Image (cartoon, rainbow, N blue to C red):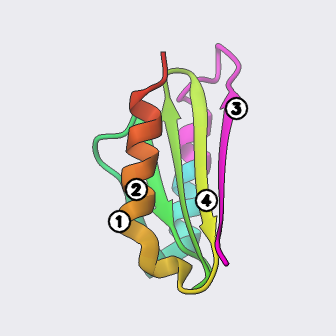
Amino acid sequence: MASLSLTLSVTAPRSAGTSLKPSLEAELRDAEANGHEVAGLGDYAIFTSVLPISSEVKALVKGLVLDLEVNGPNGRSLEAPVIAAAKAAGGRLP
C-alpha cells in the first residue's frame, strides 16, 4: 500500500524564494544521484528519492512551499507521476 501527502506551507514575505532556495539546494546535494531539479514548476523545484520506498517533490510556488511525497513499495519508480502530480497541484494555486 502506498501513501500520498501534499503539504502547502506559507513562507514569510521577506523569505519567499531567497532563504528557502538554498535549503532546497542543500537537500538536493544530500540526495546525490537520487535527486534533480524539476523544470516548469514554480520558482524552484526539486525531486528527491532518498529511500527506495519514497519519491518527493518540493517547490517554491507563488510564495508557498509545495511538498508532495509518495511512500510505498517501489516509491522511487514513481518519479514521473509524482512530478506530474506536483506540477498539476502547483498549476492550480491562485
Residue 69: image tag: 4
Does residue 88 lie above or below 47 as drawn? Answer: above
The kind of residue on which mark 1 rests is Ala
Residue under pointer 1: 80
Residue picked out by circle 3: 9
Q: Residue at x 46, y 54 (%)?
A: 46
Q: Which residues are magenta?
A: 1-23
Label 2 Cα neighbours within 10 Å, binned few <14 / some 14-19 / many ≥20: many
- The residue shown at (53%, 29%) is 17
Q: Are marks 4 and 2 in contact (CB under 8 Å)?
A: no
Q: Nearer the viewer, residue 73 or 15?
A: 73
Q: Residues within 10 Å of mark 1 (few under 14, many from 20)?
A: few
Residue 52: image x %, image y %? 57, 86
For disc 3, the neighbor class at 10 Å (few under 14, some 14 to 19, many from 20) is few
> Residue drawn at (48%, 23%), measured in percent from left and top?
93
Looking at the image, is mark 1 or mark 4 earlier in the sequence? 4
What SS does tag 2 mark?
Answer: helix
- Badge nearest the viewer, 3 or 4: 4
